[in-house]
Amino acid sequence: MACIRLKENCEFNGENTYRHVHAHLPNYARPHFIRIKSAIELTATFKYRKVQLMEEGFNPAVIKDCLYVLDEKEYTYVQMTQAIYNSIKTHHFRL
């Protein structure tokens, strides 16, 4: 999973992001999930807070931020829904 903050007045484009990730990252390094946050939280030593993000995982019922999942068949990142989450958990949606 990658957690990013968008520039002001920008919106996430799943197709462009897919093309960029596919062109610049090897298969094993491509994020399956992209989480969009309004602000990235830092610790007192200016490190990113990751523990809470890892605990929340990718369950859309828990996460209030926008969350996208890599869809290799459609060549894009699509917004995570509860139906997609359930199909991932039951192994019908292949990561």
Image (spheres, helix red, strand yellow):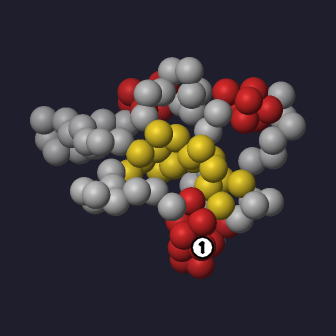
Which residue lies under the disc numbered 1?
Answer: 19
| Residue in the image at 29% along x and 42% along y | 38
Q: Residue furthest right?
A: 92
Label 1 environment density (alpha carbons within 10 Å; few <14, some 14–19, many ≥20): few
Q: In which quarter of the view is residue 51 placed?
A: top left
Q: Is residue 95 toward the left or the right of residue 79 in the image?
A: right
Q: Where 10 falls versus 36 (above or below)?
A: below
Q: In which quarter of the view is residue 31 placed?
A: bottom right
| Residue in the image at 60% along x and 73% along y | 19
The answer, for residue 28, to whether it is visible in the render is: no
| Residue in the image at 62% along x and 39% along y | 80
Q: Position of residue 41 (x, y in %)?
A: 24, 38
| Residue in the image at 53% along x and 65% along y | 17
Q: Where 12 falls versus 52 (above or below)?
A: below
Q: Where 18 falls versus 4 (above or below)?
A: below
> Label 1's element?
helix
Count of number-bearing discs: 1
Q: Residue furthest top?
A: 61
Q: In which quarter of the view is residue 47 placed?
A: top left
Q: Where 43 falls versus 30 (above or below)?
A: above
The answer, for residue 40, to whether it is visible in the render is: yes
Q: Position of residue 79 (x, y in %)?
A: 59, 44
Q: Residue furthest left?
A: 44
